[in-house]
């Protein structure tokens, strides 16, 4: 898909719907990082549009290191697709991109789902870089996938959920996306640090319906961020899940997608 002077990788799921649901993914992720259990459930009654950020996966160009730039690219892609109204699902870092998009083009969005994310200057967000790097190093030393350590709790339920999630990520065996490079990871961590360094919002972020989802044991984006967002979004509701970390959407895919589908039903 050509937009904003470059080529973006876009993947669409589900039947046509007048208002599609746009998926914005997490730190260090590409199109294949979307859990099939989540995508398949949400695509039952909606058109889904997943977008690789500039320089990520099969998208061309140099990866952006600010969420404002990433949001501007998403808006350009949606313009090229000729969508005038969307719903938005931002996961982790994607939730920060979603907030930046709301600041740039609020008229484009009808409803928003924000999962495992936080506002500018959110509590503990500047520590996210250290958590991510330590988790990645520990995973390498123990020959595990970093997502096991960063997204899930150490409980029996958390370990089982991690194994099931990683198995699901291997289900797609055709048209796989290009791998995410270390340069992408570094640039996106800079964007997170800038987000954490920014001044805290002094006014409501958004006045239309918003659903917040968070794991109560999230080490990457502490759950206090969800409560901070709740105060900044006057028409919002919050669902938290015990014994769940940053991968709450993957660990509780059935409950989460049921809640999202109900929330998005007009």
Image: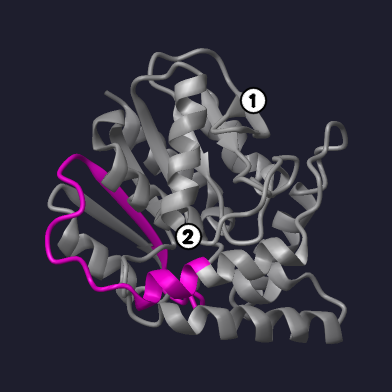
Q: Position of residue 107 (x, y in %)?
A: 24, 31
Magenta segment, which residues? 191-220
Is residue 45 visible from the viewing direction of this image? no
Q: Where is residue 177 in the image (x, y as percent from the top left)?
A: 78, 41
* Label 1 Cα neighbours within 10 Å, binned few <14 / some 14-19 / many ≥20: some
Q: Which residue is drawn at 82% across and 75% down?
A: 144
Residue 42 located left or right of residue 232: right
Considering depth in this image, is 180 or 35 the residue closer to the camera?
180
Is the Cβ of the residue at disc 2 closer than 8 Å to that at disc 1?
no
* Label 2 Cα neighbours within 10 Å, binned few <14 / some 14-19 / many ≥20: many
Residue 111 located left or right of residue 51: left
The answer to whether residue 196 is above or below residue 26 is: below
Considering depth in this image, is 164 or 32 the residue closer to the camera?
32
Provide the residue designation for mark 1.
1
Dot 1 falls on a residue whose secondary structure is: loop
Residue 229 included in the magenta stretch of the image: no
Quarter of the picture containing the N terminus is: top right
Q: Residue at x 62, y 25 (%)?
A: 2
Is residue 69 visible from the viewing direction of this image? yes
Provide the residue designation for mark 2.
66
Q: Where is residue 214 in the image (x, y as percent from the top left)?
A: 40, 63
Q: Residue at x 42, y 19 (%)?
A: 83
Q: Which of marks 2 and 1 is nearer the N terminus?
A: 1
Q: In the rendered image, which quarter is residue 41 located in?
A: top right
How far is disc 2 from disc 1 in space, using C-alphas?
22 Å
Q: Residue at x 40, y 82 (%)?
A: 124
Quarter of the picture containing the C terminus is: top left
């Amino acid at each position: 898909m050509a937009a904003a002077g470059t080529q973006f990788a876009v993947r669409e799921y589900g039947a046509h719907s007048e208002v599609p649901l746009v998926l914005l993914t997490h730190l260090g992720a590409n199109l294949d990082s979307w859990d099939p259990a989540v995508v398949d459930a949400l695509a039952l009654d909606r058109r889904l549009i997943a977008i690789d950020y500039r320089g990520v996966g099969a998208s061309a160009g140099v990866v952006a290191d600010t969420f404002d730039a990433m949001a501007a690219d998403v808006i350009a892609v949606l313009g090229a697709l000729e969508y005038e109204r969307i719903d938005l699902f931002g996961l982790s870092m994607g939730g920060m991109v979603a907030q930046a998009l709301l600041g740039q083009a609020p008229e484009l969005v009808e409803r928003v789902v924000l999962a495992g994310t936080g506002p500018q200057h959110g509590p503990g967000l500047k520590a996210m870089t250290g958590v991510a790097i330590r988790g990645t190093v520990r995973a390498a030393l123990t020959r595990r996938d970093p997502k096991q350590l960063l997204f899930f709790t150490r409980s029996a339920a958390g370990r089982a959920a991690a194994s099931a999630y990683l198995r699901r990520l291997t289900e797609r065996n055709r048209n796989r996306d290009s791998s995410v490079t270390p340069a992408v990871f570094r640039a996106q961590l800079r964007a997170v640090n800038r987000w954490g360094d920014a001044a805290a919002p002094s006014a409501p972020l958004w006045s239309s319906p918003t659903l917040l989802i968070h794991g109560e044991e999230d080490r990457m984006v502490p759950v206090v961020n969800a409560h901070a967002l709740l105060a900044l979004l006057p028409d919002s509701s919050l669902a938290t899940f015990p014994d769940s970390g940053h991968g709450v959407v993957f660990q509780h895919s059935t409950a989460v997608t049921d809640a999202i589908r109900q929330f998005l039903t007009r």
